[in-house]
Image: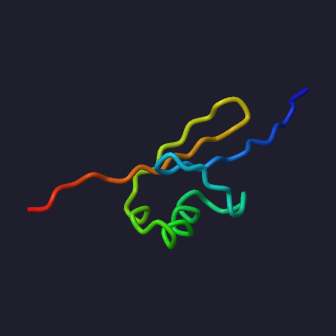
Amino acid sequence: MIEVESITRVFKYNGVTLPDPNPTLPIETVRSVYAHQYPELGSADVQSEIKGKKQIVTFQKVLGHKG
């Protein structure tokens, strides 16, 4: 018998855990939602990993240089 388990998404940015605004939204949409509060998320990299019953999605600011 196959058992279906739900996975809880956890979003992290800059050491802060952000709540999932809506589990049905795609990750890119969640990033756009939080970009209103954290503008640098608009161009952030997204990393995702599964640990146990959690999907941990980390937004990382893209480092660049001017010039």
- Residue 44 position, x and y percent, is 40, 56
User: Which residue is more in the foreground, 17 or 4?
Assistant: 17
Give the image quarter of residue 26: bottom right
Q: Residue at x 56, y 69 (%)?
A: 33
Q: Residue at x 46, y 66 (%)?
A: 38
**Quadrant where the image shows the N terminus:** top right
Which residue is drawn at the image coordinates 70% and 29% (left, top)?
52
Tell which of 48 and 3 is nearer to you: 48
Is 55 rendered above or below residue 28?
Answer: above
User: In this figure, what is the number of numbered marks?
Assistant: 0
Q: Residue at x 72, y 57 (%)?
A: 23
User: Does residue 63 appear left or right of residue 29 in this picture?
Assistant: left
Q: Residue furthest front?
A: 15
**Residue 61: image location, x then y, percent:** 37, 53
Task: Give the residue furthest to the right.
Answer: 1
Q: Is residue 24 left or right of residue 63?
A: right
Using the image as rendered, state which of residue 9 and residue 5 is in the foreground: 9
What percent of the width, then of the height, locates residue 35?
48, 68
Residue 65 occupies quadrant: bottom left
- Residue furthest to the top: 1
* Quarter of the rendering occupied by the C terminus: bottom left
Please say which color scheme the image uses: rainbow
Q: 59 above or below 31?
A: above
Which residue is farthest left? 67
Q: Is residue 51 above or below residue 37?
A: above
